[in-house]
Amino acid sequence: MNKIILVLFCGVFALSSCKTQDLISPVASTLPTAIGTTNVPAVVVASLSKNFPTATNTTWNQTSPTSFMATFKQNNAGKVATFQNTGAFLKVGDVIDPATLPTAIIDYLKANYAGYTIVQADAKFTKDGLIVIGYETLITVGTTQYELEFDATGKFTKLETPDGHDEGAGIAQTALLPAITTYLGANYVGYVFKEAESKMSLGVVTGYKVEIVQNNVKYNILFDAVGTFVSVNTGGKGGDNHGGNEQGNGQNGNDVVIAQTDLPAIVGTYLTTNFAGYVFVGAVVEKNTAGTVLGYEVKFTLAGKSYETEFDATGKFLKLN
């Protein structure tokens, strides 16, 4: 087995279609070297120690103005974890030998990124660590970096932003295209906006998904890149399928969409303290069949990235998704 590549770089990810090398038009960036621990916020270093107390041989890279990536050993295995500059833990993966990647991934890279170099390969596993559910590859073409995600079979699924989130970004209601707002007002009178996000393919916006509630029914509505209606599905309590290919959001029927002002004060305080400048996108309160509050989920954007946080019934922070 070849030596595992542990070197990490950071750069600006491609934001345009890359079917062939001639079509790649990313925002280029010179690849920086690793940074010392003294240049990493103390809260981030503390978060690494808290989440991975047995980590050794740690090196750091800053992958965006608000994100840091740690490469380390744990139980003799190579790991890579990403953290927000507030200390929030974002994701972790197992570093693997690029030679073990499925052939489909290598074929995709050769076809779409001529002259690429694999900097790192990660495998994502089920919680028990027994079954591979996907792969991530960090590659460079010249001085430009790309991070691509694939499913367990090696099929390309998406490009990723430096902090591991899908390029599709959360969108505030006030930022929706006028065509979408007009359509919703005409066809769902009295609706309550829940959340919206862009859908992207190889860095290009291909459409939008908007989730709303009307008369206690949740609707997942798809629009194309210019805001023209495509399809709609209902999801959650009382929903009947209205056609289209997008599945419902899979939320429990007892989840209730709430306004930002309905969140416990402790939740708002936590978000303001740890995600200064965030833009609220949507929230739900989770209840059991007896109506007892179980917790809260809040979705928001920060610096163009989408996040989802979970809190318990008292408003105590649980995790960042």
Image: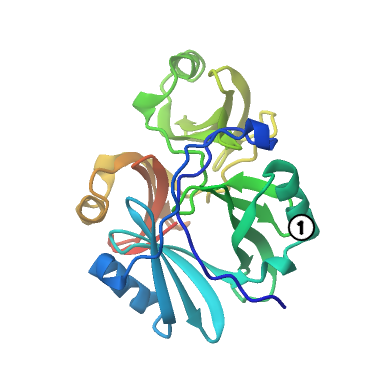
**In the rendered picture of this protein, how many numbered marks are placed on residues?**
1
Give the image location of residue 61, x and y in percent: 40, 63
Percent coordinates x, y for residue 40 in the rendering: 29, 66
Q: Is residue 22 left or right of residue 297?
A: right
The answer to which quarter of the image holds residue 18 is: top right
Q: How is the image coloured?
A: rainbow
Q: Residue at x 60, y 50 (%)?
A: 148
- Name the residue: 42% across, 85% down: 54
Viewport quadrant of the C terminus? bottom left
Q: Which quadrant does the N terminus fall into? A: bottom right
Foreground of the two, 189 or 300: 300
| Of residues 123 and 207, the one drawn nearer to the viewer in this rendering | 123
Residue 221 sits above or below residue 93 on the image: above
Q: Which residue is mark 1?
A: 153
Q: Is residue 312 left or right of residue 91?
A: left
Counting from the top left corner in percent of width and height, residue 121 is at 62, 64
Q: Residue at x 39, y 75 (%)?
A: 51
Quadrant location of residue 104? bottom right
* Circle 1 SS class: loop
Looking at the image, residue 166 sits to the left or right of residue 247; the answer is: left
Taking the spot 53% from the left edge, 19% from the top edge, the residue there is 227
Name the side, left or right, on which 291 lies relative to 5.
left
- Residue 244: x percent and y percent? 69, 29
How many neighbours does mark 1 have within 10 angstroms: few (below 14), some (14-19), or many (20 or more)? some
Q: Nearer the viewer, residue 284 or 65?
A: 65
Mark 1: which amino acid? Answer: Thr
